[in-house]
Amino acid sequence: MNYIQTVLLPTDFSEHALQASRFALGLFRRAEVRFILYHCFMPFQGSFAGSQAERDNKAEIKQLMGRLHTLRQKLAHEFPEAGIDLKVDKGVESRRIIAWSK
């Protein structure tokens, strides 16, 4: 399917974020839209490749992707026609969201 626009659904896994995602999915229900369920976190800092911080970041990404997958399943049950991709990002959330919008 060729999408004409992308809608970013940022989430912090709160009930308010879930309601906002539901609202957006309902609003664009009949449009050709690609949805991205998005979460951003501040990574642990480490100075060496293979460090504990790097391993912790990989584990955090895996855990967050699992939570996004569960959330997508919940939303897909309510909006089965919606195509929802998942994205976990690292960094300052406001900066990362602005980067996505460009």
Image: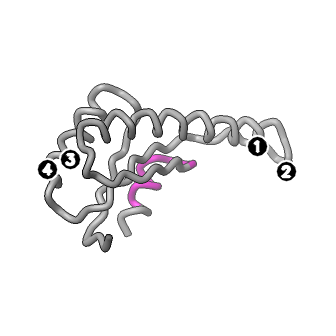
Q: Quadrant of residue 31?
A: bottom left
Task: Provide the secondary structure element on which disc 4 rests.
Answer: helix
Asked if the stretch drawn in magenta spans residue 94, the answer is: yes
Identity, as a three-letter code, of the amino acid under mark 4: Leu
Numbered label attached to residue 49:
2
- As drawn, the residue found furthest toward the top would be 15
- Depth check: give the residue in front, 18 or 84: 84
Q: Identify the residue shown where x is 18% and y is 41%.
A: 23
Residue that badge 4 annotates: 27
Q: Which residue is mark 1?
A: 54
**Magenta run includes residue 2:** no
Rounded to the nearest angstrom, the CA distance separating label 4 from label 2 is: 44 Å
Question: On the rendered image, what quadrant is the N terminus found in?
Answer: bottom left
Q: Amino acid at mark 3?
A: Ala
Q: Quadrant of the C terminus?
A: bottom left
Magenta stretch bounds: 90-98
Please tell me in which quadrant of the rendered image residue 76 appears: top left
Amino acid under disc 1: Glu
Q: Earlier in the sequence, mark 2 or mark 1?
A: 2
Per the model, the C-alpha gap separating discs 2 and 3 is 40 Å
Secondary structure mostly seen in magenta is helix
